[in-house]
Image (tube, grey):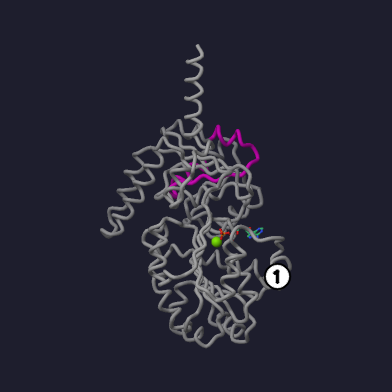
Amino acid sequence: MDSAVKDNLKKIFGFNQFRGNQQLIVDNILKGNNTFVIMPTGAGKSLCYQLPAVSNKGTAIVISPLIALMKNQVDQLNSFGINAHFLNSTLSKTESNRVKGEVSAGLTKLLYVAPESLTKEENVKFLKSADISFVAIDEAHCISEWGHDFRPEYRKIKSIIAQIGDNLPVIALTATATPKVQQDIQRNLQMEEADLFKSSFNRTNLYYEVRPKVKSETKKEIIKYIKSQKGKSGIIYCLSRKKVTEIAELLKVNGINAAPYHAGLDGHVRVKNQDDFLNEEVDVIVATIAFGMGIDKPDVRYVIHYDVPKSLEGYYQETGRSGRDGLEGHCLMFYRYEDIIKLEKFNKDKPVNERENARVLLQEMAAYAESSVCRRRFLLHYFGETLSKDCGFCDNCKKTKETFEGKEDIIKV
Ligand code: ADP
Ligand code: MG
């Protein structure tokens, strides 16, 4: 690797060394190769395209699904002294013209574009005229109906890239690694030949546990649990906005410093609650899955699922928000089969195809929750990975150990 690139890692991003596959990936992108990156959440995917973008001439296009996420990343890059901008529906005509001006002048290293904006004809025309170094597709699982976050606009990306330039290198990144999703992404982007960098999904510092959900008992259990975690940060995920409000209120009346977060809340309330959580003025955020994407709080000590997620991908993503600092994170899910049935009912109005996909995802989720084998083994197997032995760090492993030790006791007697 060019030493100037390594210098940039320290000088611009402030990191002393690469993590995991980052260096190999950066190298591969700098060579102009199509690259497919599968790395768990929090592993550091952004740097994989940000560093080559800064080191290359021209502008890298970054396609990203969430406007809020885009703004965070651009603000962060700007604070590092990098010229980065975004193009999305929040910009006025004047603002987007100013952004385009900077790109045309060759000043902008990274241009974040929402898929909706990318498909606009005037933008395609503009990007065609610009000097583009490569295209990064973040959260590439949005391409797949098998992902947990399908976005139809993502399916148009490939043809737009082809219009913007001949042989533009493409880098696709995702934290969703099921073999099905991976295949879908590669097929859709015609990236079967791309170099694949897949890291392990094993988060060894996370403890996985599933407890039965029993109406009023569970709420008491949660309050007790949180009180035992005094001063620590945690997230509770609920399925509905109504449930979020209810649980947040319940925690508050029990003297717990909690705040709700869901898409139905007023914009500035949402931002305030999120900031309060990040700044540790609030210990617990009770949220729908609207909360968390792109949130980088390293010391979340527990994630509680009050309701079962719709898929194991979702579960993995959500639990993955704990223990990002490498210290222990507790992933505690409350489960009852009725919740699966409830979720299946929600799917009734979906088109047949989607309904069937959703049903399969949900059944895998139920199988995980009901399984008595090592949770980590189950989860990793789902992501196409094999664990050579049981993890010893989940409720099922703990139970097996206890039973085994119990038996030994009997033999001794
Ligand atoms: P992902 O997109 O894979 O979920 P991010 O790109 O958001 O992950 O990175 C997660 C965190 O890791 C960020 O706080 C980022 O600053 C940090 N990070 C990334 N690369 C490195 C590195 N080489 N050394 C230290 N921290 C890093
Ligand atoms: Mg990311």
- Between 9 and 248, the residue placed more toward the observer is 9
Looking at this view, is 198 or 13 the one in front?
198
Q: Nearer the viewer, residue 237 or 46?
A: 46
Instruction: Check residue 239 for magenta coloring.
Output: yes
Q: Is residue 22 magenta?
A: no
- Residue 18: give x, y in percent of width and height: 65, 61
| Residue type indicated by callout 1 | Asn
Q: Relative to 95, is 220 above or below?
A: above
What percent of the width, then of the height, locates residue 79?
69, 68
- Pointer 1 residue: 8
Residue 10 appears anywhere in the view: yes
Is residue 104 positioned above or below 20 on the image? Answer: below
**Picture residue at 42% right of the left edge, 55% below the top:** 178
Q: Within 10 angstroms of label 1, few (less than 14), some, or many (20 or more) residues?
A: some
Q: Measuring 58% from the left and 54% from the top, which residue is drawn there? A: 274
For this view, does 93 lie left or right of residue 107?
left
Q: Secondary structure at mark 1?
A: helix
- Give the residue at x 56% y 72%: 29
Highlighted magenta segment, given as a residue range = 223-249
Provide residue 23's location: percent of width, then percent of height.
62, 64
| Residue at far left of view | 352
**Which quadrant of the picture is home to ligand 2?**
bottom right
